[in-house]
Image (tube, rainbow, N blue to C red):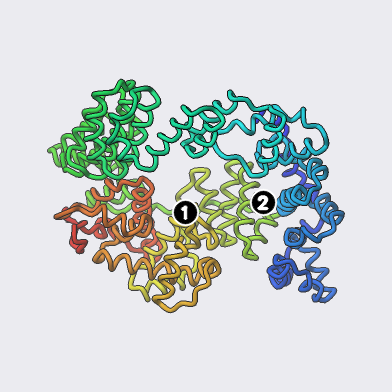
Amino acid sequence: MHPVRFAARYFQSRLFAFLCCVLWTPSAHANPTEQQREIFLSVYQSVERGSWAAVDELSPAQQQLLQSYVLWPDLRAAWFRANLDKANHAEIDAFLEQFGVLKPARELRYRYALHLAKTGDLAAYLTIYQQFYQGLEIAKLDCLALRAEIAAGRGPRVVNRAVDLWTVGESQANECDPVFEHLMDEKQLDVTHYIERFELAIDARQFSMARWLGKSIDQQHIDIASRWLQAQRNPESFVRNYKNWTNDETTREQLIYALERVTYDDPELALKYWRGISKGNRFSAKQEYRTARHIALWLARDNKPGAYAQLTGLPAAAQNDEVLRWRARTSLRDRNWKNLITDIGAMSEKERGAEEWLYWRNVALQHTGNKPEAEEAMRALATERSYYGFLAADELGLPYAFGSSRFVADEQTIAKLEARPALVRARELFLVGLDSRGRSEWDAVIRDVGPDEKMQAAILAHRWGWHSRAIAAAASVGQYDDLSLRYPLPYDSTFRRYAEDASISPTWAYGIARSESLFMPDVRSSAGAIGLMQLMPATGRDVAEKIQLPYSGLDTLTDPDSNIRLGTTYLAQMVERYGGNRVLATAAYNAGPHRVDAWLPEKGSIDARIWIENIPFNETRSYVRRVLAADTIFHWRMTGETRRLSDELLLVRAESKPQPLANN
């Protein structure tokens, strides 16, 4: 975005936030009552579906209470959203004028603007666009504005902006198609524009689009795009037939791309091909380093023979932090302690200082006879309340450093925060079950307050039982010592009941839920998992069928009681699948059992700590460590007793049978 436009838009957003907090209607400052919440909840769903009848049926006194409720704008906005086709535009305009600084009104304005454009009122759309959306660089909105300009007879003035929107490597919003047709009709796109977009499409790996663009250039460009498509769709065949391709720069890039795709499925085969291809083609040093590093890393991640030699054999220019991490993990997997010390020593100072490598360097020192140095370093690490801190304490037989201490409340600051209209709204949204909307409004306020206020906001949210906001606010200012706030026990009886039914530990279920959702019952992941324990809909349906729990999709998964029941049942299924090994079950909960099956040793067994370090997925590796540490903390929170983390780390065996940790 242009700096001046960005600054203007930023100032406008800050002004809106100020107005929201200071100038909003008096009802925003009223103290909401439980009766108002009950009335709101009694009508909201039907209003959201487009019917105002439930409100009309309320008594005059109830209607008055509802209209003075802080969430009255949300109710009106919900009705307008559901009735854009028939709502009076003057009423919408009046509503936006009165409540336009609030999020429900801003959302309505966006939909209203799109509705105006869709129904052909481009002039009205353009008025809203120029006031609120111009300069935000949202292609859909920009193209609708250009269409409005074209419809008003101002086509020549939009050409440059339209060409900018056209010249991207991916397909634009459908709303842009009429604009691009205008460019073509006016002959404002020549072959140079097509070549520029063709190259952008290749860089974005949008090869089908590139081939379409090639038809407006020449046969050579069509052929280039077609070869890219072959490399994408059948990479092994493309690499296998590399001698049939011309030896030019484009073909070399295509070969490397195809080879990278082969590597994901079979890094050993990719290495074999690379050895042949690299001899007969003039690859640049950058291309050689990138390809050799990619293959070596996947050999290590897939635990293939010769991986360590490939990693250490990379030229210095091809080495990076990820290579050094996997060198260390491979040495660890091979229990080559001398190499492990060397690998860690080659890391940057920052990387060496990570708890992971501090712990494993000390283990390696113990195995190579440097016990005094290792013990001293372990003692320092054992003061940390973390996965590695607990493992270090286990090595030395020391107590865990739980070190919980309550955050000190500043009641005056808390009272001021609690009275802020924006936080009153956020709390009410949370209390009526519109949690995601509440989180958005809470975050918008807390993002801009100072560290001391953030800490008090964490205490306030904790008092409200809004645990996700409390945990997030405390973490944002680096405050971790109040374990009652950071590791709360919501839905306690529910977790205990269903964990007992599933014959698993409730503390483990708590560790999963905290790591998955921070106890947000409505949250959805980018992969589609839903609810407290983040279940995929298909998993939830399968588990519900097995335990004969009525299942209605989203409603079931966002219901805390049902979600916890399904999640604990699924955890029990995973731990049974892996012979009682909770490390494997935890990994399977995150990455899926089919992947964990592939990560098991082909024969024999491996120390669970070492197996965790060699999980190929960074996300799953961190997740397993986080859940195990949280399980340990929750056990202490719920029982007052310490359960040694190492006692939970069973050997990972090819046949997944539970065995004691070898070191124990």
Pick the residue in front: 111 or 518.
Answer: 111
In the image: residue 302, left or right of residue 502: left
Residue 591, horizontal then vertical, whole percent = 36, 55
Left or right of residue 603, residue 245 in this image: right
Q: Residue at x 39, y 61 (%)?
A: 634
Cβ–Cβ under 8 Å for marks 2 and 1: no
Instruction: Name the residue rendered at 30%, 35% in the picture.
Output: 239
Mark 2 / mark 1, whichever is N-terminal? 2
Q: Which mark is residue 99?
A: none
Q: Nearer the viewer, residue 194 or 531?
A: 194
Identify the residue under disc 1: 527
Q: Is residue 376 visible to us here?
A: no
Residue under the point 40% across and 77% down? 547
Quarter of the N terminus within the rendering: top right
Q: Is residue 73 above or below residue 501?
A: above
What residue type is disc 2 on? Answer: Leu
Q: Residue furthest bottom?
A: 548
Expressed as whole percent of the image width and height from the top left, the position of residue 467 reads: 53, 58
Image coordinates for residue 354, horizontal then vertical, percent: 34, 38
For label 2, the residue is 417
Residue 629: name its quadrant.
bottom left
Nearest the viewer among 157 and 412 is 157
Name the image quarter holding residue 340: top left
Q: Is residue 551 toward the left or the right of residue 337 in the image?
A: right
**Three-letter amino acid code at disc 1?**
Ala
Q: Tell me what residue is drawn at x 59 percent, y 50 percent.
A: 456
